[in-house]
Image: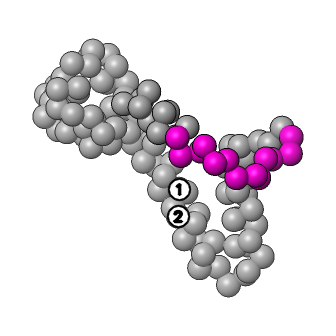
Amino acid sequence: MQIDAPYIVARLMRFYGMSWADALRMPATRAWTLYRQIDRLEAEEDLRQTSNIRAANSPDAGAFREHMESLAKRIGDPVKSVGPLNTERDPDAGAKLKKLAALRG
């Protein structure tokens, strides 16, 4: 068996957004595990795109609406309010944001 290592490294880099150095520092077992998942993940994305295209081109407006609702349901609600939102303007918001940015920086 021959292994085309540059191709494997290039594919890992492109798919996972890695640098050459990061890909080469990775343990071989982890690299193989991630490499084997690329086709599965791409197939999942292709199925989703095909489903989106099919729904968008469907003459049935109800099917498109159902598809959009199912996608929204899958996304869920990433931010949940636990009480009433405070909508009053905070005059110190800019200073607080700068303080947070300085901590990060």
Circle 2 residue:
50
Residue 22, above or below 44:
above
Residues at circles 2 and 1 in contact by the CB criterion of under 8 Å: yes
Does any portion of residue 36 appear in the rendered image?
Answer: yes
Seen as rendered, the residue at the extreme bottom is 59
Residue 86 counted in the magenta span: yes
Q: In the rendered image of this protein, does residue 104 appear above or below residue 52?
A: above
Q: Tell me if residue 6 comes above or below residue 91 in the rendering.
A: above
Is any atom of residue 76 visible in this view? no
Three-letter amino acid code at the position of disc 1: Leu
The residue at the point 19 percent across, 39 percent down is 10
Q: Position of residue 27 (x, y in %)?
A: 27, 15
Horizontal side of residue 105 vs 62, given as left or right: left
Is 80 colored magenta in this rendering? no
Quadrant for the C terminus, please. top left
Residue 42, x across and y down, in percent: 42, 48
- Residue 2 is left or right of residue 35, and the answer is left
| Residue 19 percent location from the top left of the image | 21, 34
Residue to which mark 1 is pinned: 47
Instruction: Give the residue drawn at x 41%, y 31%.
Output: 102
